[in-house]
Image (cartoon, rainbow, N blue to C red):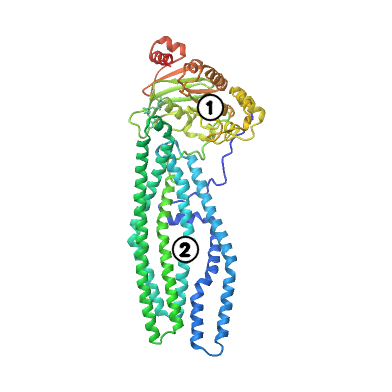
Amino acid sequence: MNSSVPTIQPPAVWEKLLDGRFDSKHPGRTLWNLFSDQRGRVAAAVTLFIIKQSPGSLLPLAVGMIIDALTKGGEGAFQKILWIAGVYFLLLLQNPLVHTSFVRLMSGALRHMQFNLRSALVERLQQLSITFYEEKQTSALQTKLLRDVDAIDGLCRHLMHTGLNGLLVITYVTVIALVKQPLLALYFLVTVPAGVALLKLFDRRFKEQYKAMRIETEQMNARVGEMLQMLPVTRAHGLESIETRSVRGVFERIRERGLQVDTLTEFFASSSWFTFMCFQLACLVFSAWLVIQHRISIGDAVMYHTYFGMLIGAVQQFLSVFPALAQGADAVRSLGEVLEAEHLERNDGKPSAPVPLSGEIIFENVTFNYPRGREVALKEINLHIKAGETIAFVGESGAGKSTLVNLAIGFRQPTIGKIFLDGHDLRELDLRTYRRQIGVVPQTTLLFNGTLRENVTYGLEKISEDLLWKILADANLAEFVRALPQGLDTPLGESGTQLSGGQRQRLAIARALVRDPRIVILDEATSALDTESERLVQEALVRLTTGRTTLIVAHRFSTIRHAHRVIVLHGGKIVEQGTHAELLAREGHFFRLAQLQSVTTNQT
Ligand code: ADP
């Protein structure tokens, strides 16, 4: 046994990043809070934005002043115009540099927020209990991680560019109008309540549509993911056209919903355009009347009119943020489903499991029913698994084998009763410290895109070359790896070298061995292997399980024979237990199962 297996360090830096800052019921506040560690940057960006926009904002003022200088005429008129042009040129000069600095600051703040949000989501996804994943499809979760975070990012960008510009112009124009002609300022201010009234009119429908659109998109992604996973089955049964039709049905719904959203957005935009153009027309007439009454100059009239045009553009810009705002708010609510999910596995503050474990597991009167299960999955299980013992669980499909093993890993908690690990109630332990001492060999070996070495050492660092080769030898994999041209550095996974069923199983055994676990959980693969492969796997398994507590969901007789004890489950209850030979001699439940299996084995 290797004594110096490195442990995995839990991440600490971003662990508490979003603590208390995320509240999906208040998307606005949440957005604000997401930038709480970036406020300095945001304030600097806003200041630079005001400076960089000044040439655009002050242009009508300059034009008005030039027209007035021209209409008044006189000696110093041209000189005055040159002065105005000179000052304006200086304003123009600062723009490129200030604009670039603004973008850097703003983008920095946004990217940081995006990073925080995604990190927090991933962290939370790693903490949620298995029940959460049963209720949510992987592709839907992926949509949240990618699309919803992008939607929030998009909203913030929109707010910072368009929204800020709109707000800035509204403020400028109001101030200039107030200074120059308070009567006109009042007229300007009417446009704001008009905008608010328009928003109110559309508010509910926007929220409804964006929520529906998001749910449809999540469903579409989930359905496409499912289709890709089912592809071999679909093709094998010649169901291509049925599957295509079904997926197209989902696309159809997206098309219709998308059309509704687009229509609503554009109807809103054109309604606001119409309203404000009417205001502009009225403003033109009003300022002409003021000129005729000699209350303002022609230069002022031109300036007011240009400013009013800008104001209307700004209010419209401001309103255009609204659909993105509704979308962003919905994305915040959507992320809340993960960040505020209640199916949390609470480990913080609980004591660690003893290191190293001796590996004794006791089930004390354990009953378990699934939240949505119709029947009780396990009934009054009393079982004492001694340290170092190998136990095989057998029984028909649905008998409760996997449930029992999942309870032992702590993926689920007993509905009634308790499970003790080395004398400690499993509920009271930090399960992460316990699971670091478990080696799991699942039914199907999942490989990720990486080298063979990375796939074996998964998550562990600094495994020496010698140790790794020893483990590969114990897993009966060394010869195979040595024969590969790239050896340990052969790429595996989707785009890498394909492994046979037996090789995959031995790789899973190596992955468990490298952790030097105190407890081994083995969900035996059901697929049949040829005799030679089976022998290699069985040998490797014996090396993995010797001296370790082992729980096997057993399908093969070769494994059952090696077990110290066989537990026979039926309808969630333990109906028999003993050694393989004892149970066969008893001619009870196990005997019948064994007979059934030998019939099937002989047939294949
Ligand atoms: P086995 O591993 O022996 O085939 P399981 O432990 O998977 O049996 O299942 C035991 C019982 O619990 C079965 O009746 C099954 O239908 C039910 N069950 C399993 N998983 C779930 C689940 N996630 N939700 C509801 N019922 C479940």
Q: Nearer the viewer, residue 186 or 504?
A: 504
Image position of 502 with respect to 80: above or below: above
Q: Nearer the viewer, residue 447 or 199?
A: 447
Element carrying mark 1: helix
Figure quadrant, ligand 1: top left
Measuring from the top left, give residue 164's x and y in whole percent. 48, 64
Q: Could you tell me how far apart the alpha carbons at marks 2 and 1 are, in whole angstroms?
A: 54 Å
From the image, which quarter does the N terminus lie in? top right
Q: Nearer the viewer, residue 268 or 120?
A: 268
Sort mark 2 into few (<14), some (14-19) or many (20+) by Cα contacts within 10 Å.
Answer: some
User: Do we see residue 80 in this rendering?
Assistant: yes
**Residue displayed at 47% across by 18% down:** 556
Residue with the mark numbered 2: 162
N-term-proximal mark, 2 vs 1: 2
Q: Amino acid at mark 2?
A: Thr
Q: Is residue 136 rendered to the left or right of residue 538?
A: left
Q: Is residue 269 rendered to the left or right of residue 176?
A: left
Q: Amino acid at mark 1?
A: Arg
Element carrying mark 2: helix
Residue with the mark numbered 1: 504
Measuring from the top left, give residue 417's x and y in whole percent. 41, 28
Image position of 349 with respect to 554: above or below: below
Can you tell me whether the CB of the residue at mark 1 lies under 8 Å from the nearest atom of ligand 1?
no
Sort mark 1 into few (<14), some (14-19) or many (20+) by Cα contacts within 10 Å.
Answer: some
Where residue 542 is drawn, which disc sits there? none
Measuring from the top left, give residue 554's x and y in whole percent. 46, 21
Farthest residue, direction bottom: 74
**Residue displayed at 45% across by 27% down:** 405
User: Do we see residue 1 in this rendering?
Assistant: no
From the image, which quarter does the C terminus lie in? top left
